[in-house]
Image (tube, rainbow, N blue to C red):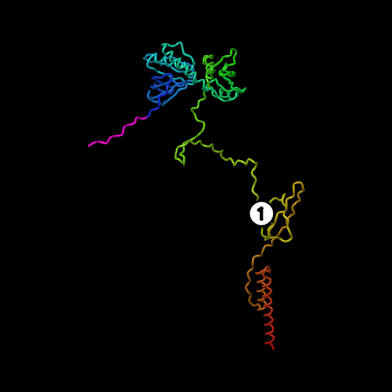
Amino acid sequence: MASALSPPRVPKHKGALPSHYYESFLEKKGPGDQDYKKFWAGLQGCTLYFYNSNRDSQHVEKLGLEAFVRLTDEAPWGSSRDPDIYFSLVLWNQEIKFKVESLESREMWKGFILTVVELRVPSNLTLLPGHLHMMADALAKEKARRAFEVPSCFMKVSRLEAQLLLARYPDCGNLLLRPSGDGGDDVSVTTRQTFNGKSVVRHYKVKREGPKYVIDVEEPFSCASLDAVINYFVSHTNNALVPFLLDENYEKVLGHVEADKENGESVWVVCSTPAAPGAGPAPASGGPKQLPPVPITPVSSQGRSPPLLNQENYVIPIGDAPAANYTNGDVPSPSQPVPKPRKLAKVQAKALKPPVAPKPEPKGLSGDLAKKLAVGSMQTLFPTTGLADLTAELEEKLQRRRALEHSAGHAGDQ
């Protein structure tokens, strides 16, 4: 039975290997490392790149040489192996130790590092003519690269800001390149050094003359690029001046990853700064916020006076008889004197007496007297306010009844 043919395996596409001025195996030990770690390393520009193997196209670490100070050949203390395979790279803020396979490899690494840092082929190393030719080729490439590159110590700051940066971050370098205050294509160099416990700040002018930069000193010096200007100051001060490189390893803005609701992709969101606690709403840009008008509530006529909104600015007219609604009078203009408001008449409402229950009819009283007492008690219970007509009608009926009884009594006597 014939087996099914499997599709041909397509090799995965690998990224192109990066090109370096020089590359080989290199063991590195940083300030925080306990032992050396082996990498495949390559030098490109002023940066050392470290890879896990020579087949990788993506580096895992990198080290800039902008803060270069010097190279040393000191072997670790107590080392029993060949001391010629060790060398150290001293930067402005740290020291990195390296270990190589042979003396030739050490001299090659030192030669290429000095070539890109000092922009010249070193002559005090044990190198063959072929090695010197390789370094001369790397020097030409590096000069061409720097001709179109702005140095990392160049910052668009003013004269005062440059002084403050160098004073605030002394560990990041003491030489800063900035635009000239005169404008145009000229630049300036600001340096800061300590002399007898005091800070000494100096400013140097660099003029742009065609494709070259001329350093304005006692003996003007012409440079082909801004990087050559920096190299002039570093080399002529025995590496006492170090290009300023602000440490950007720490973030200044808080952010977080958040999923986009529309497409579901992850996006980086910068957190907004919360307002200070207890802070009230910001006033409108046009001025202070106006208060809303106060509504006027109609007042009933049950012996109460309407509320006064402002006795100094408003006048409320009052008639002889209370009305259902009151209207505020017109406010006089500021140029006219404001009349004083009239005092409101005090309304003294008489307190109603509590109702008095009718007393029981005393014994021994005559019918007429008892009826009179009953009528008097009813008048006390029902005051005349609103019941006067009812009382008069009852009195009239009572008088008629008395008249009938009186006439009936006279007829019986007769």
* Residue 83 is one of the magenta-drawn residues: no
Q: Residue furthest bottom?
A: 414
Drawn side of residue 67 relative to residue 318, left or right: left
- Residue 224: image quadrant is top right
Considering only vertical position in the picture, is 371 above or below 330? below
Drawn side of residue 27 relative to residue 303, left or right: left
Considering only vertical position in the picture, is 125 above or below 292? above
Residue at left 68%, top 56%? 306
Taking depth in this image into account, of 304 and 236 the one nearest to the observer is 236
Magenta range: 1-12
**Quadrant in the picture for the N terminus:** top left
Taking depth in this image into account, of 283 and 61 the one nearest to the observer is 61
Drawn side of residue 246 relative to residue 322, left or right: left
Kind of residue sitting beneath label 1: Ile
Point out residue 120 in the picture as x, y percentages from the top left corner.
48, 14
Point out residue 222 in the picture as x, y percentages from the top left corner.
56, 15
**Quadrant in the picture for the C terminus:** bottom right
Q: How many marks?
A: 1
Taking depth in this image into account, of 330 and 154 the one nearest to the observer is 154
- Residue 15: image quadrant is top left
Considering only vertical position in the picture, is 84 above or below 390? above
Drawn side of residue 112 relative to residue 196, left or right: left
What residue sits right under mark 1 in the picture? Answer: 296
Residue 206 visible? The answer is no
Point out residue 366 in the picture as x, y percentages from the top left corner.
66, 78
Mark 1 Cα shell of 10 Å, populated few (<14), some (14-19), many (≥20)? few
* Magenta stretch: dominant secondary structure: loop
Taking depth in this image into account, of 5 and 286 the one nearest to the observer is 5
